[in-house]
Image (cartoon, rainbow, N blue to C red):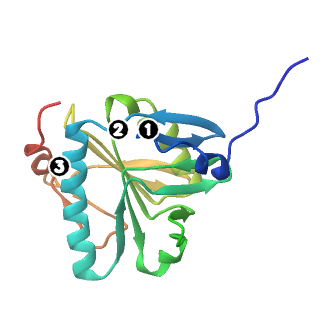
Amino acid sequence: MSTVARLLTYDDLCRMPDDGQRYEIIGGQLIVSPSPVRAHQELLGDLYAVIRSHVRRHRLGMVYFAPVDVRLSPHDVVQLDLLFIREDRLDIYKARGDVKGPPDLVVEIISPSSEKTDPGRKFDLYAASGVPEYWLADPATHRFQLFVLHDGRYTETSPVAGRLHSTVIAGLVLDPSALFAGITEV
């Protein structure tokens, strides 16, 4: 007789303890991560400041940082590092604190605890869920990747003169080397 594990849902996630761990559900399975490392937090703060300033100045939408539960399906609830939602889609961020559906931009910063899920399982999940743009930054290697969704698959965007141009945040141009310049060594 075989037993099949029940797939977890957002309701299960809401019952997790508030113990400083980061709880997510991918494919109905629980993923537990410790708090991020210092370099991760420094890069997250800098990215948030740059994006938020641009988005507010041009009234394009809102930028949020973790922890925010993002419900991509009944069995996929993630806490990404940073997200952007266009002005006309802000209703997907519910009053109770969860985002229901794909944000317009997802940013993940790789930490030692997320080096397998962020560029792997989450990469595939975000593409399958229809997230139009995905950024992946690694403070340890100073690698910054910008992916744009085309026909359900991500294509990496190449820098122009060392800068990356967002396709979902009009006019936003990033200089990854400048972002990594102020980050404490990992």
Q: In the rendered view, does 37 fall on the left or right side of 167?
A: left
| Residue 78, percent from left and from top | 51, 48
Residue placed farthest to the right in the image? 1
Where does the image place residue 116, in percent across and percent down from the top left?
43, 29
Q: Secondary structure at mark 3?
A: helix
The answer to whether 108 is drawn above or below residue 64 in the figure is above
76 vs 90, left or right, is right
Residue where numbered disc 2 is placed: 35
Residue 153 x, y percent position in the rendering? 52, 49
C-alpha span from label 1 to label 3: 29 Å
Sequence-wise first label, 1 or 3 = 1
Q: Which secondary structure, mark 2? A: loop
Q: Count neighbours of disc 3 (C-alpha within 10 A) and say few if under 14, some if 14 to 19, many if 20 or more.
A: some
Relative depth, front residue between 121 and 15: 15
Q: Nearer the viewer, residue 70 or 153?
A: 70
Q: How many marks?
A: 3
**Which tag, 1 or 2, sits closer to the chain's start?**
1
Q: Residues within 10 Å of mark 1 (few under 14, many from 20)?
A: some
- Residue pictured at 17% horizontal, 30% vertical: 186
| Tag 2: amino acid | Ser
Tell me where residue 27 sits by quadrant: top right
C-alpha distance separating marks 2 and 3: 24 Å
Which quarter of the rendered picture does the N terminus lie within? Answer: top right
The residue singled out by tag 1 in the image is 21
Q: Are marks 1 and 2 in contact (CB under 8 Å)?
A: yes
Residue type, label 1? Gln
Task: Identify the image quadrant of residue 85.
Answer: bottom left
Task: Give x and y (percent) for residue 118.
Answer: 42, 38
Spatial CA distance of label 1 from label 2 is 6 Å
Decide: marks 1, 3 in contact (CB < 8 A)? Answer: no
> Can the viewer see residue 171 in this picture?
no
* Residue that numbered label 3 is attached to: 176
